[in-house]
Image (cartoon, rainbow, N blue to C red):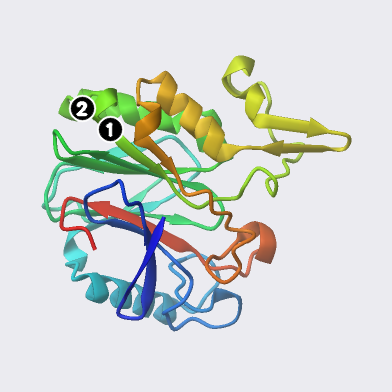
Amino acid sequence: MEITTIAGIRILQFHEINTLHGFTARSGGVSEGGYASLNFGRHSGDDASRVEKNFERLFHGLGIDASRVAMTSQSHSNHIRRIDGQGHGGVHEDTDGLMTNVPGMVLVTFYADCTPLYFYDPKHRVVAMAHAGWRGTLNGIARDMVRGLHREYGVRAGDLVVGIGPNLSKERFEVGPDFPEDLVPEEDFSRYLDRSPGRITFDMAGCNSFQLQEMGVLQENIHLSNLCTYDEKDLFFSYRRQGRASGRMAGFIGLGEKI
């Protein structure tokens, strides 16, 4: 991914996704302590006025009309909503994926270790974002998004360009006893579990990439950031590294000029 600085805010982008999109780094905001400084977590424990100021800074810096922003209130589900424009801005509860073909609408999802998935179809001019934690990954949100884009807009998987953004790497994602190894068929993800004595780790990015290819997305059209939110302390917040007092990054995409 490439880093661009806009109004003091560092934004990471995929070279291969030729539309408005990005993933925010943690600097350039007004939050303090573990939330320093560009925190977008409204329920993270940070001062609410600072979080709203961070949103204002981002939208102003990007020239985005806040009334045309659709955001998720995530539940680690595979629930996806279609955004049709007028009246569809604001926060969408119990939602982990958004899609639109409306120019000027911007889709925003939030992260502190989970996997951001960016979808762009340059042929049909459609964009989408999905928040894929381990639950969403194992429940198949990547697959469901590809199906939904085809159903709603006629998008073909082979036309999609997909970015898999910064997340908790396999080396850092040690899973606990609540990780249900039988949630989906074993062959779907067993290759992305690394078992060693007393330790099991999970490759979220790899598992999502596998599911996308299974749905027909071309391997050469899937682009991985290979950035770990835990290890890149200067760039990212990390719930696994910081605990509850950690901020949230924003992932966004829209049909508009690339930054």
Q: Is residue 254 left or right of residue 217?
A: left
Residue plotted at (29% across, 25% down): 157
Residue 45 spot, x, y in % from top left? 55, 71
The quarter in which the N terminus is drawn is: bottom left
Secondary-structure class at tag 1: loop
Residue 18 spot, x, y in % from top left? 23, 49
Mark closer to the observer (1, 2)? 1
Q: Are circles 1 and 2 on residues that touch, CB within 8 Å?
A: yes
Q: Is residue 175 above or below residue 219?
A: below
User: Badge 1 local density, few (<14 within 10 Å), some, or many (20+)?
Assistant: many
Residue 52 spot, x, y in % from top left? 36, 75
Please state which of residues 48 and 229 is positioned toward the viewer in this rendering. Answer: 229
| Disc marking residue 155 | 2
Q: Is residue 26 left or right of residue 106?
A: right
| Residue 90 visible somewhere in the drawing | no
Residue under pointer 1: 160
Residue plotted at (47% across, 65% down): 41
Residue plotted at (28% across, 47% down): 17
| Disc marking residue 56 | none
Q: What amino acid is at disc 1?
A: Leu
Secondary-structure class at tag 2: loop
| Residue 1 visible somewhere in the drawing | yes
Please state which of residues 211 and 77 is positioned toward the viewer in this rendering. Answer: 211
The quarter in which the C terminus is drawn is: bottom left
